[in-house]
Amino acid sequence: MSSFLLSVSRTVSIDFISSPEVNFFKKITGSFGRNGPTFVFQFLGKEDFEPTTNRTYGSILSNLTFVKTFASGILVPKSYILPLDDEQYLVPHTSLVQDAHKAGLQVYVSGFANDVDIAYNYSSDPVSEYLSFVDNGDFSVDGVLSDFPITASAAVDCFSHIGRNATKQVDFLVISKDGASGDYPGCTDLAYEKAIKDGADVIDCSVQMSSDGVPFCLRSIDLRNSIAALQNTFSNRSTSVPEISSVPGIFTFSLTWPEIQSLTPAISNPFRVYRIFRNPREKNSGKLISLSQFLDLAKTYTSLSGVLISVENAAYLREKQGLDVVQAVLDTLTEAGYSNGTTTTKVMIQSTNSSVLVDFKKQSKYETVYKIEETIGNIRDSAIEDIKKFANAVVINKDSVFPNSDSFLTGQTNVVERLQKSQLPVYVELFRNEFVSQAYDFFSDATVEINAYIYGAGINGTITEFPFTAARYKRNRCLGREEVPPYMLPVNPGGLLNVMSPLSLPPAQAPNQDFIEADVTEPPLSPVIAKAPTSTPGTPSTIAQAPSGQTRLKLSLLLSVFFLSLLLL
């Protein structure tokens, strides 16, 4: 090998030579002259033996002055510098970088890849991992060995040593999805507080209704999707509601607000099938909050520009449960001071139902956001004109911007362009950090994906479970340059397909549907139909109740008289 390298060096410039063998370096020392390559000694596992000295690499690590006699740098696994505990969380860093620099050695780190498990502290974000080695306030390594150079280059050049108050280079809304639900159970106080701390512009509340008429925040109307060990506690409340779900569930309108408050929230793990889990130490942390508490929290942070309140299943709740979620939201907003101008926090109301947004428009001046659930390939002019009658903005999914086949991008639609041309801002969901949530074209890097949608497609906002990643992108210094570096240029949709062997191409997909006026138009919401009290022993009354204390008091008195009569009999 040494003879080969000497021969190659006559025609090729070699910058670095690394090896895990001491004898190899001793053999080639002096062969390349003063301007030759940098020799980098590679450390393997701490318990592995180096063949020349017959010592473990861990023991050689304690004698860096010896390494300096034959090398100018060292290449070490990540764990030599930032070790992990048994639960895959970071423990305090070692002094290796400082010790090596003191000995006159450069430090390079190996083991970086975007599509492997990393410490939970990084929230599945590879850029954060790189920054922990080059921008941590204590030390900086001299280089990294990476399977994904695009991420390493962007981390060092575009995101290192920029503070949270650095100048924003691009303007778009960072909208949370159930708060920072990638780090804490969604819709809890901790998830919302972290979303605000992480730089979200807008925090969201998916409003659900309890049986006693209290609006609160939870991603799903089926409590089983967000609550730990629910089946054991309230299995007798399981019901079948074909209008909502094809399978039985334990729905929010079957429990009172005090009962819901007693439940333990659970973090979402959408990629459990891949054995990818989120922040297990905090998997049941935080507490669920009412819409009133959510609005009070938002008012206390001047960094927030707005709140987004999502309303679904309004027709069913009115007709079958006697619960008016629209009126409950409006009343709560008024009580919290959002309707009289005492707060500057903007309110956006989102729904997949045009009838819900029309109802809100009739009764308030809040901004409305129409969510298109379907994946679409085009949107007709007539549909856009209909949407403009009741909505100020539109939410679409990622595939409606960049369609894909088997996780390979196949191109780009004109949906964003057409909506924006009609003065409708476009927000896109759902952005996640886990690499399995992204098309292969994004190189398993959430920042590359965000760059494609913001810098490439020009969307107006991201809806994300990891607000920190999107908020950091705003401060991307590379976007402020006259010439944007290649690792910050948006990917070419369909670019990977163009370099694939025809035999490896994914099957052709049918084109996504056109979104037409008939997909938008809905009949008006029906009035609230009061629900009769249940006579099932041991379960709470599900009489339709307004959130006012007066109505609840009347109901309590009636029930008291009823039970007293039974006792007297």
Image (cartoon, rainbow, N blue to C red):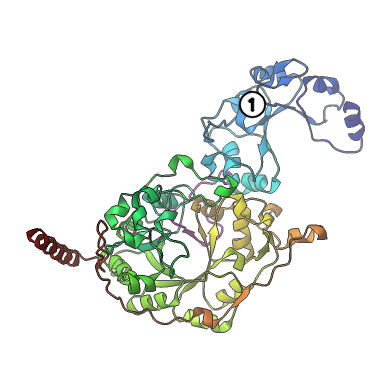
Magenta: predominant secondary structure element? loop
Name the residue type under label 1.
Answer: His
Q: Is residue 410 above or below residue 266?
A: below
Give yes or no for residue 219 being in the magenta stretch.
no
The reply to whether residue 484 is in sight is: no
Q: Is residue 219 above or below residue 311?
A: above
Q: Residue 78 in the image: x percent, y percent? A: 63, 33
The residue under label 1 is 101
Q: Residue 488 in the image: x percent, y percent? A: 66, 54
Q: Residue 129 in the image: x percent, y percent? A: 58, 41
**Numbered disc 1: secondary structure:** helix
Q: Residues within 10 Å of mark 1 (few under 14, many from 20)?
A: some
The reply to whether residue 457 is in sight is: yes
Q: Residue 128 versus residue 250: which sits nearer the camera?
A: 250
The quadrant in which residue 64 appears is: top right
Q: Is residue 468 above or below residue 45?
A: below
The quarter in which the N terminus is drawn is: top right
Task: Single out the residue that lies furthest toward the front.
Answer: 569
Q: Residue 359 in the image: x percent, y percent? A: 37, 77
Task: Single out the residue that lies furthest toward the bottom.
Answer: 382
| Residue under the point 41% across and 75% down | 357
The quadrant in which residue 331 appears is: bottom left
Give yes or no for residue 175 being in the magenta stretch.
yes
| Residue under the point 62% across and 55% down | 438
How many numbered badges does the structure rendering display? 1
Q: Which residue range is magenta in the image?
A: 160-179
Does residue 250 appear left or right of residue 510 in this picture?
A: left
